[in-house]
Image (cartoon, rainbow, N blue to C red):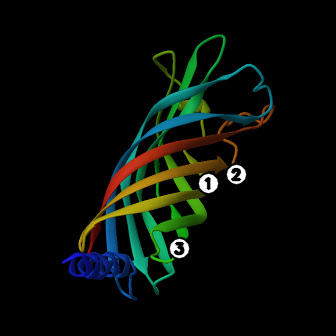
Amino acid sequence: MKNLLLAAVAVLSLTISNAQEREKGVFEIAPYVGFNSSNFNGDEVEGLDNRTGVAFGVHADYYFNDRWSLRSGINYLPMGADGIDGELELNYIAIPLNANWHFGSTRKWNLNFGFSPSFLTNAEFEGIEVTDGIESFQISLSYGIGYKLFINENFSLLFEAQNDLGITDFLEVNEVSRTNYGGSFNIGGVFNF
């Protein structure tokens, strides 16, 4: 009886392990929500505190093989910083284009990297709209690491840390140069098609 139970556990483990590997043409969609923290790089940023908020969106992965996929999607990113005079809130819709490398013996881990064009949805300083002084478009480096917890053949839970490092200046004035950077810890559901 003990040997039969051990054999059943071994077969179940192999089934679960192999179920995580994806083949060419597999498509996954992963809605997520997360805790975001952001600040600025550049001129006159000393003494600024992080702005925190809720990030959310949907990732989509198209698999080329069991190790590589192309990740894109649409993400809401709250960026900005909190200074002595008040908080500057910059909210963006981002459309990342990332290579996603799946690693580990069962490909439960992933490491993604690429570029993320972002579009400003609104900009406020202490509740007053300041959109006129902010660039409406930015590009950032996007990178992160994640882990998928297998639930069944068509669904997994996703835990990830994702970062965006601004490349383009978000201020329209030329005297000061500033870029956004931020990171989020996310949880989501991965649906396999």
Instruction: Residue at 68%, 34% (x, y): give it.
Output: 40
Where residue 136 appears, x then y in whole percent? 54, 44
**Circle 3 sits in a helix, a strand or a loop, which is it?**
loop
Q: Are marks 2 and 1 in contact (CB under 8 Å)?
A: yes
**Circle 1 sits in a helix, a strand or a loop, which is it?**
strand
Q: Are marks 1 and 3 in contact (CB under 8 Å)?
A: no
Nearest to the observer: residue 166 or residue 168: 166
Q: Which mark's residue is nearer the viewer, 1 or 3?
A: 3
> Which mark is on residue 139?
1
Task: Indicate which disc, 3 or 2, sits on the residue closer to the N terminus.
Answer: 3
Q: Is residue 163 above or below residue 128?
A: below
CA–CA distance between discs 1 and 3? 31 Å
CA–CA distance between discs 3 and 2? 31 Å
Q: Is residue 123 above or below residue 16?
A: above
Q: Which mark's residue is nearer the viewer, 3 or 2?
A: 3
Nearest to the observer: residue 164 or residue 65: 65
Where residue 16 appears, x then y in whole percent? 31, 75
Instruction: Residue at 65%, 17% (x, y): give it.
Output: 83
Q: Is residue 15 above or below residue 144?
A: below
Q: Quadrant of residue 154?
A: bottom left
Q: Where does label 3 land, which residue? A: 104
Nearest to the observer: residue 131 or residue 161: 161
Q: Could you tell me how many numbered marks the image carries?
A: 3
> Which mark is on residue 167?
2
- Quadrant placement of the C terminus: bottom left
Answer left or right for 87 relative to 32: right
Where residue 177 appears, x then y in whole percent? 77, 37
Answer left or right for 100 relative to 149: right
- Residue type pointed to by label 3: Gly
